[in-house]
Image (cartoon, rainbow, N blue to C red):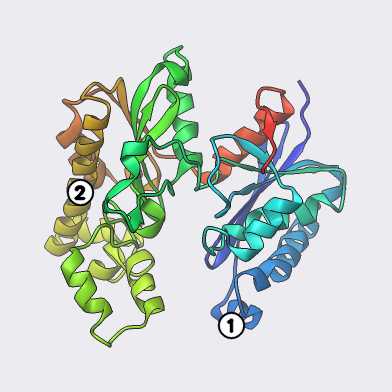
């Protein structure tokens, strides 16, 4: 079956990762990086749209990729209103919600807008798939401990859903028939979700730093100490937010979030690096154990996905602590680009319905 050409766009804080798939196979991959000066000149995240779009179009032109032949432009979904799992057409309402940050402002908000702009240059469709705000939580999972605070579903929905379906297919079962614990440990935060009969009924709020600490996010911190730090007068709100979501975790403890550098330090006998990496594995395993109770102690499998599971030291410590709970499947190479492309290809094959954002 001959399929069309798909452009994948995944905006991150200081870069945009793009890929082109032809007949379901990747034929181009590029990470476009932006300097602090370029980003600052835009004034705000929404102000970055034109700069990022021009850089993407120039990269495609330089590599002889004709945008007029695109069939689908798929982007990482941003902070729109909570939605059920699925693929959504980028419509005017979604564009407005992404631009005003209806659920918050983040670089991923730019994905749908840029996809829509590029698709408008030709006859392509602009879609997003399983944005971070996919919400299937059971009501009891929303209770935090105080009525002023409600737990939200903001996590790696795209990645978790793709690996869960891939695992189900590998054992000739339907995703909707299984109860799974899924861990995604990529370049940002770490999320651990309880998937019951095709829905993520509980998950840590990874986007805001809740749960295990990760390469650059602090994870759940001691509340009293955090309150005192916030009112110490030494930090602004933005600085505290950066500390928790972008300057925490491995970066805070070891001065780097480069896994290759950290792995080399461990191999060379760096005891601090070994201990901190072990502590991260400890917290991930503990979160898996907690989520296991959501499935009444009977998950069909535990799925581990994301770049961190390329790191042998980390993976061995996580698996050693959870291997008696259920069988383990590891998908370390499952990244955002592949996950987005799989959804776009599913749309072209008629296997995935495109939903309307309302």
Residue 230 visible, this angle: yes
Instruction: Find residue 216 and report its horizontal and vertical position in percent.
Output: 35, 62
- Residue at the image point whose x is 22% and y is 62% from the top: 221
Mark 1 — residue? 37
Between residues 69 and 268, which one lies in front from this camera angle?
Answer: 69
Camera-side mark, 2 or 1:
2
Q: Position of residue 144 (x, y in %)?
A: 28, 50
x and y percent of residue 339 in the render? 55, 38
Judging depth in this view, the residue of 218 and 264 nearest the camera is 218
| Res. 334 in view | no
Q: Is residue 280 above or below residue 330?
A: below
The quadrant the C terminus occupies is top right
**Which comes before the other along the chain, label 2 or label 1?**
1
Q: Is residue 200 above or below residue 44?
A: above
Rendered location of residue 237, percent (x, y): 38, 78
Residue occupying the point 57% across, 57% down: 108
Image quarter of the N terminus: top right
168 vs 347: above or below = above
The answer to whether residue 35 is left or right of residue 286 is right
Is label 1 in a helix, a strand or a loop?
A: helix
326 w.r.t. 331: above or below: above
Q: How many marks?
A: 2
Q: Which mark is residue 302?
A: none
Q: Which residue is mark 2?
A: 283
Label 2 with label 1: CB-CB less than 8 Å: no
Label 2, label 1: how many angstroms apart (C-alpha)?
37 Å
């Amino acid at each position: 079956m001959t399929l069309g050409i798909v452009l994948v766009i995944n905006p991150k804080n200081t870069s945009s990762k793009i890929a082109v798939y032809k007949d379901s196979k990747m034929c181009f991959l590029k990470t476009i990086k932006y300097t602090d000066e370029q980003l600052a000149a835009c004034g705000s995240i929404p102000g970055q749209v034109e700069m990022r779009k021009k850089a993407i179009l120039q990269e495609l032109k330089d590599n002889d990729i004709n945008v007029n032949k695109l069939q689908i432009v798929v982007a990482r979904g941003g902070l729109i209103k909570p939605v059920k799992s699925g693929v959504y057409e980028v419509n005017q309402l979604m564009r407005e919600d992404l631009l005003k940050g209806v659920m918050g402002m983040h670089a991923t908000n730019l994905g749908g807008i840029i996809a829509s702009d590029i698709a408008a240059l030709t006859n392509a469709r602009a879609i997003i798939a399983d944005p971070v705000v996919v919400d299937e939580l059971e009501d009891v999972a929303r209770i935090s401990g105080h009525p002023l605070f409600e737990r939200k579903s903001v996590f790696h929905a795209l990645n978790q859903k793709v690996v869960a379906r891939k695992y189900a297919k590998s054992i000739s079962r339907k995703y909707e028939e299984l109860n799974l614990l899924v861990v995604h440990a990529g370049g940002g935060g770490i999320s651990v979700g309880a998937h019951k009969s095709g829905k993520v009924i509980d998950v840590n709020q990874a986007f805001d730093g809740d749960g295990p600490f990760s390469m650059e996010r602090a994870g759940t911190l001691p509340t009293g100490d955090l309150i005192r730090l916030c009112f110490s007068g030494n930090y602004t709100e933005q600085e505290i937010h950066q500390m928790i979501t972008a300057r925490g975790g491995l970066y805070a403890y070891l001065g780097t979030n480069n896994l290759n550098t950290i792995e080399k330090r461990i191999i060379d006998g760096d005891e601090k690096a070994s201990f901190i990496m072990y502590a991260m594995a400890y917290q991930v395993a503990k979160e898996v154990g907690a989520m296991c109770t959501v499935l009444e102690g009977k998950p069909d499998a535990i799925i581990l996905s994301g770049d961190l599971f390329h790191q042998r030291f980390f993976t061995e410590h996580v698996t050693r602590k959870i291997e008696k709970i259920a069988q383990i499947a590891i998908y370390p190479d499952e990244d955002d680009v592949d996950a987005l492309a799989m959804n776009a290809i599913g749309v072209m094959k008629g296997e995935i319905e495109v939903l309307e954002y309302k």
